Image: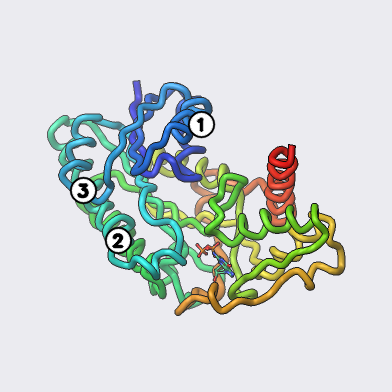
Amino acid sequence: MTRAFITGITGQDGGYLAEQLVAEGIVVHGLARALDNDTARDLLSRAPGVVLHQGDLGDADYLGQLIADVRPDEIYNLGGISSVAYSWQEPVLTARLSGLAAAVVLGAAWKLQEDSGRRVTCLQASSAEIFGHAAGSPQDESTPVRPVSPYGAAKAYAHHMAGVYRGRGLHVATCIFFNHESPRRPHAFVTRKITDAAARIGAEGSGVIHLGNLDVCRDWGWAPDYVDAMVRAIRHDIATDYVIATGQTHTVAEFAEAALRRAGLGDGWRDHIEVDAEFLRPAEAPDLVGDATKAHRELGWESTVGFEELVGRMVANDMELLQRSNG
Ligand code: GDP
């Protein structure tokens, strides 16, 4: 029976991935840093049978031993600091968890393959942030790596290490993910922050969302689609890099407009947004939009949820949560 190991299993993508793999009948082990009862119960109800390990991704000895003990066939490295904004506050921790931990995972996978004589396959979750001030638009697998944030730099190291271990003979695929969202997105991300606030403003008829850079462009897709891309990429005959993106780009202001309109604010939406310097970043990847032609061609992968639909689903979810909490 196939065994999978997921780092970052309690994150948005880790949860969707665990669900997908369990539904396929795969034995899933996952590593999580903090595992409170609610999180564990929630995950187990959606992905029954998942084996959860609580531990520190930054502890190389622990992580290496865990992979040796679990003996997975498929390893998905999703763990680490996921918020670019937070990476500016904790650049060293970000390097350790989003960068160096990949070297530990890949080293352990290589050793397991050597010792067992079985093929071990790996998927590194890369990020469009590695392109930073991108040399061109849209970005594809050949776009130069030029990060502008601590998160992007850490992910760039991990991305390069995936290539290094691929060269050594390990089956390591990467998905270079552009932004991907869902109702499970934490509020640290601008999409969820906006949809949560839009639901409240819609219900109360007043209120303001304090945001940073409104003009930055992002390519926002539906997270479960991106998780599906990982599974296709790790199982493809040839391990390589894939940009996973919708190819459509929108500004933060456009996201806020769509969310506020969906929450019933109509043409008055602009009155509910204010720029607050607190949310501006020291440097910014100004225009991220991906060309996923290679994933379409080689993996048969498609993005299934467009921008308006994505915003609509997230706002509807937050409206429902608000209604429920108001009794
Ligand atoms: P990221 O692309 O992985 O950094 O995802 P985020 O959702 O955190 O941010 C997306 C974009 O929204 C970035 O370019 C941010 O600068 C911009 N942004 C504007 N206002 C905000 C805000 O209030 N919070 C966050 N998180 N991002 C903001």
Q: Is residue 224 above or below residue 71?
A: below
Q: Is residue 214 above or below residue 239?
A: below
Give the residue number, with chain letter if any, for mark 3.
Answer: 59
Give the residue number, with chain letter if any, for mark 2.
Answer: 93
- Tell me which label, 2 or 3, sits earlier in the chain: 3
Give the residue number, with chain letter if any, for mark 1.
Answer: 42
Work out whether residue 282 can be spotted: yes
Task: Please name the amino acid that badge 2 sits on.
Answer: Leu
How far across and how far down the image is residue 113, in percent? Answer: 19, 36
Q: Secondary structure at mark 2?
A: helix
- State yes or no: discs 1 and 2 in contact (Cβ < 8 Å): no
In the image, what residue occupies the spot 38% across and 56% down? 81
How far across and how far down the image is residue 130, in percent? Answer: 41, 67
Q: Is residue 191 above or below residue 31?
A: below
As drawn, the residue found furthest toward the front would be 327
In this view, the residue in front, 270 or 63, is: 270
Cβ(mark 2) to ligand 1 < 8 Å? no
Q: Is residue 286 above or below residue 185?
A: below
